[in-house]
Image (tube, grey):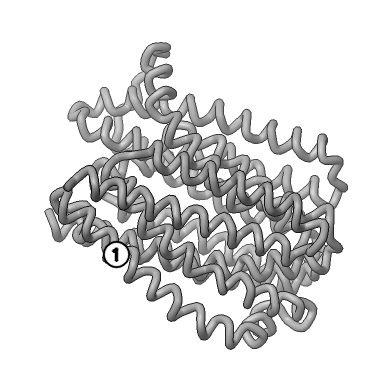
Amino acid sequence: MRRRIASNVGWMLLDRCSQVLVGIGIVAILARTLGTDGFAAFQYAQSLVLIGASVALICGSEVVVPRLVALGDLAAQHRLLKHVFRLRLLAACCAYLLVCGFLWVSRQGDASWQPALILGIAILLREPSGVVIAWTQAHTQTRPSVLINLASLALKAGSVATLAVMGIHAVGAYAAAFVLEALMAAVLLGTFYRKYMPQQAVDYDGQLTRQLFRDGSLFWISFMLMMAARRADQLILRPHVPSEEFAAYAAAMQIVDNYTTLATILAGGIAPLYVYARDASAGIRNVLKLAAFITIVGVAGAVPLILLAPWIVHLLYGAAFAEASSLLRLATLASPLVFADVGFTILAAYLRKPRWIAIKWGLAFLATVAVDLSAIPRFGAKGAILGYAVANVLATLAGIYMWLHARRAQA
């Protein structure tokens, strides 16, 4: 069993690492091909769509996987997944409408409308089909879903590279390449599911639907708050600064986001055996050690990132994004806090306390909005970085408080 768990963790790490590395290359191509104006429009649209996508994740794997494990009958599993799929599809449609509504209310120009509407199509494809990934996780078979993700990622990367080589500068064309990734993944996941699961019709069960909605609501709210806290800065910043400054900020934060993903990769690889497999006392104690280790890694990686910021920005984005180097240095100073937060978040997952996660991200979201609304009009992109830093300080302090509370309760 441990070998199988280790294999699954290895496949998941391969997936995350590939997403990060290929993502860096794709963003570099977008920046160099689209220029500051086009890149700014694309990044704004992507931030809006990512927040909208969180609305579609109404019944996450935290709720679905344990239920699937408890159901040994394939027909019963199929019935459950059908209801989850319907919930997510309805939520995805609502999410797409919310994206459209925000664009209309905020009176965005055509430059933002087109990529947002195209990228939003991925919401309708990715989140509903994600129920198949939950099904593979319940059967501890992550390899098929990872291979599907990698194949879809290769299609997106190939499409973006082809468009760039052809000299195409239309933002909508690159947005369509991102949708191709979601389309291919949805088709392959659906085909894989149909091969192994029964396909009989499933009658609608209102009671089951309400139960799934109720059980998954806290995780759902937590995820929406997390995405809003991470992406609201760009929505607030865009109307207050020129495209060049917004593009520089988005470019810097892309590097920081990819760097801090290392924290999630480390936590995902270490926590299953070092925390989840231990008893409560040892698990809580090891969370602190894990958080400290990940934070040290974050600090160690931040130092060369700060020193090499101008070279990294020029290598990835070119001379047009030179302004991003100073912003990258400022944002990187706050990045070790993200590593610490990820480490302490393991505690809430270990103790099954989704309410803790919701409270933490609620605080982070409120801090981001409050600081950004006051600082961005005065300081521009640097004000957004201040909001990023304050939000991460609060999230880390909340994690430390929750760890102390758990330790006292265990004593």
Please count the marks in the image: 1
Q: Label 1: which residue?
A: 290
Q: Is residue 399 visible?
A: yes
Q: What residue is rendered at 55% in x and 26% in y?
A: 90
Left or right: 48 in relation to 103: left
Left or right: 88 in relation to 214: right
Q: Residues within 10 Å of mark 1 (few under 14, many from 20)?
A: many
Q: Is residue 354 above or below residue 184?
A: above
Looking at numbered disc 1 in the image, what kind of residue is underneath it?
Answer: Leu
Q: What residue is rendered at 53% in x and 58% in y?
A: 392
Q: Secondary structure at mark 1?
A: helix
Q: Tell me residue 92's x, y (percent).
A: 58, 33
Identify which residue, 207 or 341, lies in the foreground.
341
Identify which residue, 343 or 150, lies in the foreground.
343
Q: What residue is rendered at 44% in x and 60% in y?
A: 150
Left or right: 221 in relation to 350: right
> Quadrant of the rendered structure where residue 84 is?
top left
Q: Is residue 72 above or below residue 106?
A: above
Q: Is residue 317 above or below residue 82?
A: below
